[in-house]
Image (cartoon, rainbow, N blue to C red):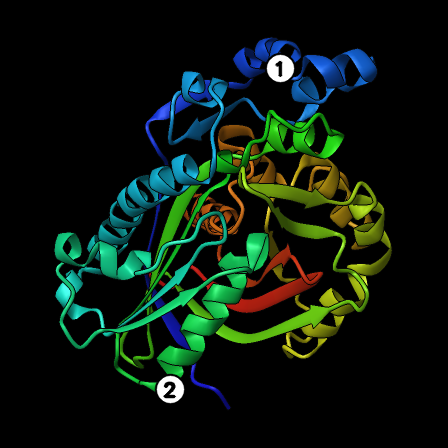
Amino acid sequence: MNSPVSLLGLATAVPPHLIDQDVITRLAPVVFQKIFDDHPGMADIFAHTGIERRNFVRPLEWFAEPRDWRDRAEAYVECASDLFVDAAQAALKHAGLEAGDVDIVVTVSSTGIATPSLDVRVGSRMGWRQNIMRVPVFGLGCAGGITGLAIASRLARAEPGKNVLLVAVELCSLAFRFDQASKTELIAAALFADGAAAVVLRVDDDEAGVARLGAAAEHTWPDTLDIMGWTVDPIGFGVVLSPELPRFLEEHFAAPAKKFTATLGLNGTKPQLICHIGSSKLLAAMEAALGLNFGTLDNERAVLRAHGNMSSPSVLFVLAHALEKGISGPAVLSALGPGFTATFVSAELGHG
């Protein structure tokens, strides 16, 4: 049987520019004038997201100017590095560790490209050892928080006693595209935000931490590449987000979720579900798929309301929110991302 992995530290970070959603709602008809002219009914999207505020790495004025790959890449390297350091240092402090104690660092990010990768770019600021193992991971999208947690957990099990740091950082705002008058870009601009989260893990029988992580699994549906992802052109990334996603989840999410839960041997105990927030529509679809009452996913809605959809870090924000509320007992952590893939990790919350 796999050794449980202790979650020793967890922290989140957001960039400095906090924008109320009603401000963005008022600006949207100006920025997206063509699509609002063509589709007047789209005006309600910003006001009905369930979001009250979001954080961006740049002020709104920055997005009003035309931006190409160079602008976006420079902003990504600078701002993602800052968020990485903020989240990582806070998580290490929570765990009672320093950067020099980290043996392995896993970095998850899909909203920018940096070579050398972020983990080594922040090396002098963090104070890594020269022999630290670096594992940068790209392309997981919104599933990255949980898939990254599963990767980090496996590395911790492979190296008992070693400290593994996971950092998920996404700057979704850098993909906002005002040059494309599409409904998909409008929905993305209404939902997405920037943020980072970090987790410290170790296999140590004497250290329970704030949670214990157990089994992990993934489920990828065939022929679903068009549901979620990026396109690439000279301006930057373009969002791929199928309008059929809520219906797809309602029809298909329950089977892999219940299959994973059945393997945990909980003897009828119903685990707490902690999942990626997506959007208010996706949360409702997941509740319907699992036969939950509308509003059951209240921790997810609280994070969505306060931060918007930050892609991979979002589910770790939900986990932090649940732990702060004192939620304990068995849990299933889940996220969804390009592939199209559902990813799961089991946990026992509330040890520390």
Of labels 1 and 2, the one closer to you: 1
Q: Which mark, by number, is residue 28?
A: 1
Q: Residue lying farthest front?
A: 234
Q: Which mark, by number, is residue 158?
A: 2
Q: Are marks 1 and 2 in contact (CB under 8 Å)?
A: no
Going 26% across and 82% down the picture, which residue do you hit?
161
Q: Amino acid at mark 2?
A: Ala
Q: Which mark, by number, is residue 298?
A: none
Which label's residue is closer to the chain start, 1 or 2? 1
Asked if one can make out residue 43 in the rendered structure from this viewpoint, the answer is no
Of 292 and 329, the residue lying toward us? 292
Of 352 and 140, the residue lying toward us? 140
In which quadrant of the rendered image does the C terminus lie?
bottom left
Rendered image quadrant of residue 337: bottom right
Asked if one can make out residue 240 in the rendered structure from this viewpoint, the answer is yes
Going 24% across and 55% down the picture, which residue do you hit?
121
Q: Secondary structure at mark 1?
A: helix
The spot of residue 298 in percent (x, y) is 61, 39
Q: Amino acid at mark 1?
A: Ala
Rendered image quadrant of residue 14: top left
Q: Badge 1 local density, few (<14 within 10 Å), some, or many (20+)?
A: some
The spot of residue 272 in percent (x, y) is 60, 57
